[in-house]
Structure formats: C-alpha cells, structure tokens
Image (tube, rainbow, N blue to C red):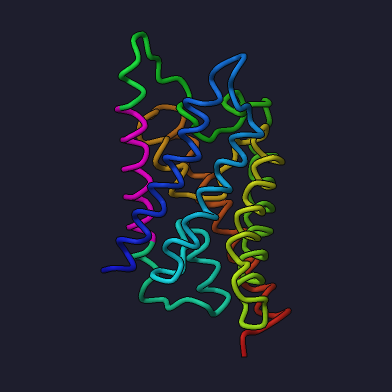
Amino acid sequence: MKKLVAEFIGTLWLVLGGCGSAVFAASFPDLGIGFVGVAFAFGLTVLTMVYALGHISGAHFNPAVSVGLWVGGRFDKKDLLPYIGSQVLGGIAGAAILYFIATGQEGFELGGFAANGYGENSPGGYGMFAALLTEIVMTFMFLIVILGATHSKAPVGFAGIAIGLALTLIHLISIPVTNTSVNPARSTSQAFFVGGWAMDQLWLFWVAPILGAILAGLVYKYLSPED
C-alpha cells in the first residue's frame, strides 16, 4: 500500500507541476515560461520525486514505465495493474486540483487544458501517424534511459538527474507534435476533464507509449541483462 500511495503522490505531482505550468505559467504572453519552461517543469517533477519517493516505489509515475520495467525484467508482474491504477488515479487527482484552481479565475475557459492530441488538436498540426511515431520513439528512448540509469552497474545516485533531463529533452522535441505524453496516466488525467476530442484521441496516448516501452524493455534486456 505504501508503494501505491507513493505512485499516486508522484503522478499527482507530475500532472500538477507539468500540466500546471502549461495551464498557468505558460499562458502569459509577456511573462510566460513558454514551452521550454514547460519542458523543464515536467523534467523537474520527475527529478524531484525520484529522490523523494524512489526508495519507496521505484518512482515509476507512468504506466508505460511500469510496463517497460516489467518487460525488462525489473518489475514484478503482480504489481503491474495496482501500480497503473494508482498512477491513473494520481494523475486525475492532479488534474482535478488544476481544474479547481483554474476555474477560480473570472472568465476561465477550459480549452485544451494541456491535453494531448493530433491533427487539428496537435500544437503544430501534426497528423495521426506523426503523433504515433513520435510517442513510440520518445517513450522508447525514455525507457532506455530509465533502464540504463537504474541498472545495477550504473553510477549510484545519479538516476534521477538522467531521467529528469531525459524527460525535459523529450518535451523539447515533441511538445509541438502531440503536446508530449509518453505517459498514459498524464494523458488520461487531462482528457478526463476536456472530454470530447481528447477522449476520442486518448487511445493513441495509451497504445504508443506502451508499445515504445515494450520495445525498450526487450532491447535493453538483450543489450544488458541485469544478471
């Protein structure tokens, strides 16, 4: 139960910090942090929670990460569904906090609410295939970094930095394409409040990250098995 609570809190913080920066701090034309700031916000949420909660749950905060670690032989199958459930609930809780804060502003309009999308809902107007490929490749590389940084032969104590910076880089590359998911729990949390098109397109942001994670788990297990 402690592990599940840690995953809930960590995913809540990821959504609150990452999506919150997009909803609030990036919205000011002159003083806003822009998408570069949003990218760093997502990276910082993971970096901080890896050191705060990693010793409790392993700091997945992402269903794709849990799947990739399981495929790579680093995570017990019996914990997979409970972890995913905690991550999705944590993400929705984080989005709910954002929603209640945001609606405190007079004249607030929900809009995209930092949801992920493709086609006309892509920040840069990228189509479904481009979005699918982007999410698969970005999640693949994210899991390669995670599996490598947390390997028993990797330098001790630096995993959080590598993982956080990897997520920052991923956002710098892919925010214009999909608003960056690589995390089905993060996508579900925002789509839950946006509804409509966000729920219709949510399938891609489950299928692509999990497929990328599975591929990474298989590749890294071949390259450098833990044993």
- Rendered view: 169 above or below 114: below
- Rendered view: 143 above or below 118: below
Magenta segment, which residues? 84-100
Quadrant into which the N terminus falls: bottom left
Q: Nearer the viewer, residue 124 or 149?
A: 149
**Residue 160 lies in the magenta stretch:** no
On screen, residue 29 versus residue 192, left or right, reads right
Residue drawn 61% across the image and 82% down it: 152
x and y percentages locating residue 146 in the rendered image: 61, 65
Q: Nearer the viewer, residue 74 or 37?
A: 37
Quadrant into which the C terminus falls: bottom right
Say which quarter of the image contains residue 101. Answer: top left
Q: Main secondary structure of the magenta part?
A: helix
Q: Nearer the viewer, residue 220 or 90?
A: 90
On screen, residue 79 versus residue 141, left or right, reads left
On screen, residue 195 versus residue 123, left or right, reads left
Say which quarter of the image contains residue 81. Answer: bottom left
x and y percentages locating residue 212 in the rendered image: 62, 58
**Residue 86 lies in the magenta stretch:** yes
